[in-house]
Image (cartoon, helix red, strand yellow):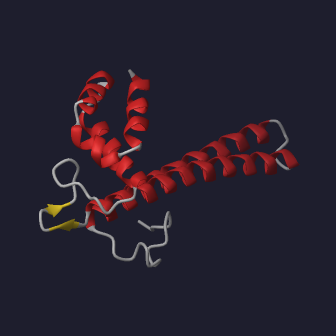
Amino acid sequence: MTIDIIDLTDPAYSDLSPIQLAMVRAAQAKKNEIVASYEKEKQQALAIQIAGNTARSAAREYQDAYFDRLAAEEVEGVRESLIYQLSYEALGSEGNEKGLYRYPENPNYTLSPSQRFLVVRNYYMQVTDDPSARLAAYRGDTLARAYLGEFYETLYDLFARDV
């Protein structure tokens, strides 16, 4: 598999862990599926144009450009998601004398407030799929109040919105 969703020679991505490389391969497979799907759409549209004797018109060029743009937008979404996943995975790869940073067992106090917000939000999103249980658990989390500071209420409002 050719990896072209991100440049692995870029210093930011040259030393990826095995988990991160698996994420890259999964994103690359998703990208390949998207591109193949839109190529199939282009071929089907071409067959319709051939049947209508319009295959040599500017409409074909516009239609191909349209499908290419849709594919590029979807691929960019997959790429951005991958970059986010890689950066989040990198946050958890560090640690201290207590072990790897992991909320709530060993929270990382060197993170910025927005990064702490993401760590706590992701923790609760993985704990349960039930929005009511998630809100109740978060409401009882005394560590989160101190750890998040002013972001505690923001995350509370986010969880309460889903209930």
Q: Quadrant of the C terminus?
A: top left
Examine the rendered structure and indicate whether residue 72 appears above or below residue 126: below
Examine the rendered structure and indicate whether residue 66 appears above or below residue 109: above
Q: How many marks?
A: 0
> What percent of the width, then of the height, locates residue 109?
28, 59
Examine the rendered structure and indicate whether residue 11 appears above or below residue 102: below
Write the residue at 45% across / 67% down: 3
- Res. 101 image quadrant: bottom left
Q: Quadrant of the N terminus?
A: bottom left
Asked whether residue 22 is in view, the answer is no
> What percent of the width, then of the height, locates residue 137?
23, 30
Nearest the eye: 39 or 107: 107
Write the residue at 63% across / 42% down: 41
Nearest the eye: 16 or 50: 16
> In screen coordinates, is 102 left or right of 135?
left
Write the residue at 25% across / 64% down: 93
Examine the rendered structure and indicate whether residue 20 appears above or below residue 69: below
> What percent of the width, then of the height, locates residue 2?
45, 68
Asked whether residue 113 is in view, the answer is yes
Residue found at the far right of this picture: 57
Nearest the eye: 97 or 36: 97
- Res. 92 image quadrant: bottom left
Residue found at the far left of this picture: 98
> In screen coordinates, is 162 left or right of 49?
left
> What percent of the width, then of the height, locates residue 157?
43, 30
- Res. 86 image quadrant: bottom left
